[in-house]
């Protein structure tokens, strides 16, 4: 079997040193992994949502999946432009990620939305951290990430609108894991019915 080559190019974009360009691309690799994982996680929720809000959640997730897939392509192409081959292989995602797999299977719409809210928290926080690391080096990549954060935050707001009380409190606010978030909204909804 041939050995996979991951050799970086000996160039980057004009205006950056090779070290700077490749450094930015290395930061983007983690974002690429996160967004590849996010689009798969959103598709998983899309397939496993049940209950009275099924169709609204099922259909709400499709445009998010497509948008995130576009972000993945944009990141990968930026990495290649910077002279670093992007790695979108599943094994690389699993080996290099810093988060656990999404932990909710078949569940109601609000349970998935509460869990996905935490997923978005992590992705957005890490995107903002990447922004802070590259903002002084590469304003082009910074603009790209700013636009992605804007879109991700909008999608998170869509999710939160389903799990927010009229007093502005998220039903999953005390949760630290996706399963806990799903359980919190389920408990809260059952208690309201009594």
Image: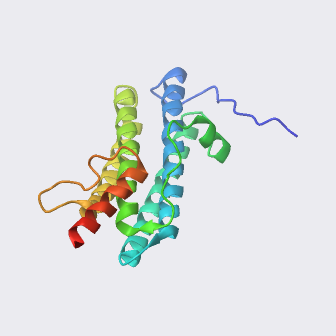
Residue in the picture at 50% in, 56% down: 41
The N terminus, quarter of image: top right
Q: Vertically, is 149 above or below 106?
A: above
Residue in the picture at 38% in, 71% down: 57
Which residue reaches farthest front?
A: 194
Q: Vertically, is 10 above or below 143?
A: above
- Residue 46, percent across and down? 48, 67
User: Is residue 109 visible from the viewing direction of this image?
Assistant: yes
* 95 to the left or right of 33: right
Answer with the quarter of the image where residue 124 lies: top left
The C terminus, quarter of image: bottom left
- Residue 14, percent across and down? 49, 29
* 183 to the left or right of 160: right
Q: How is the image coloured?
A: rainbow
Q: How many labels does the image show?
A: 0
User: Is residue 89 visible from the viewing direction of this image?
Assistant: no
Which residue reaches farthest right?
A: 1
Residue in the picture at 65% in, 47% down: 90
Tell which of 160 and 10 is nearer to you. 160
Residue in the picture at 40% in, 76% down: 51
Tell which of 113 and 111 is nearer to you. 111
- Residue 84, percent across and down? 60, 34
- Residue 119, percent across and down? 41, 49
């Amino acid at each position: 079997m041939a050995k996979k080559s991951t050799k970086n190019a000996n160039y980057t974009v004009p205006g950056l040193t090779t070290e700077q360009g490749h450094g930015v691309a290395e930061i983007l690799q983690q974002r690429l992994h996160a967004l590849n994982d996010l689009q798969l996680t959103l598709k998983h929720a899309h397939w496993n949502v049940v209950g009275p809000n099924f169709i609204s959640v099922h259909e709400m997730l499709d445009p998010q999946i497509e948008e995130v897939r576009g972000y993945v392509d944009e990141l990968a192409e930026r990495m290649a432009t910077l002279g670093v081959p992007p790695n979108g292989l599943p094994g690389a995602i699993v080996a290099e990620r810093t988060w656990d797999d999404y932990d909710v299977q078949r569940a109601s719409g609000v349970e998935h939305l509460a869990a996905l809210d935490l997923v978005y928290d992590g992705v957005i926080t890490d995107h903002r951290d990447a922004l802070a690391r590259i903002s002084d080096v590469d304003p082009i990549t910074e603009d790209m990430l700013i636009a992605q954060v804007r879109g991700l935050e909008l999608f998170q707001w869509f999710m939160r609108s389903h799990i927010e009380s009229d007093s502005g409190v998220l039903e999953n606010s005390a949760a630290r894991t996706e399963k806990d978030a799903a359980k919190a909204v389920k408990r809260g909804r059952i208690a309201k019915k009594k």
